[in-house]
Image (cartoon, rainbow, N blue to C red):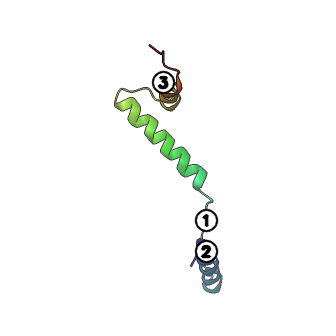
Amino acid sequence: MSITQQYLLDSHRARLHGEPEPPAPGRHDVAVVRELRDYRRFRAVIAGRPAHGRLRQALSRWLRPRALG
């Protein structure tokens, strides 16, 4: 059973019993990603690392052309 089918089944059951419908799948995804980002930044600060720009800095080191010689 897919997530959509489960959601439709749960919504139908909620309507039959007069209960509030469950949230749609993916409705809170953006909030979860923001919470994760904030948590990772917080943990970086506590550990004494830069809170932002770490990925871009690592990619620039990796993609920087190396001197031949």
Kindly state the secondary structure of the residue where label 3 is placed: helix
Q: Give the class, few, some or many, for how many residues have Cα within 10 Å of label 1's Cα (few <14, many ≥20).
A: few
- According to the picture, the residue beneath numbered tag 1 turns out to be 25
61 in relation to 42, above or below: above
Q: CA distance from mark 3 to mark 2?
A: 45 Å
Name the mark nearer the viewer: 3 or 2. 3
Q: Earlier in the sequence, mark 3 or mark 2?
A: 2
Q: Give the class, few, some or many, for how many residues have Cα within 10 Å of label 2's Cα (few <14, many ≥20).
A: some
52 in relation to 9, above or below: above
Q: Nearer the viewer, residue 29 or 13?
A: 29
Q: Give the class, few, some or many, for how many residues have Cα within 10 Å of label 3's Cα (few <14, many ≥20).
A: few
Q: Position of residue 54 (x, y in %)?
A: 47, 29
11 in relation to 49, above or below: below
Q: Which amino acid type corresponds to the residue marked 1 in the rendered image?
A: Pro
- Residue at the image point whose x is 65% and y is 82% from the top: 12
Q: Position of residue 66 (x, y in %)?
A: 48, 19
Q: Earlier in the sequence, mark 1 or mark 3?
A: 1
Q: Which amino acid type corresponds to the residue marked 2 in the rendered image?
A: Tyr
Kindly state the secondary structure of the residue where label 2 is placed: helix
Q: Would residue 63 appear left or right of 20 to someone viewing this image?
A: left
Q: Position of residue 33 (x, y in %)?
A: 54, 48
| Furthest residue in direction left, as rendered | 47
Q: Are marks 1 and 2 in contact (CB under 8 Å)?
A: yes
Circle number at residue 61: 3
Q: Are marks 1 and 3 in contact (CB under 8 Å)?
A: no
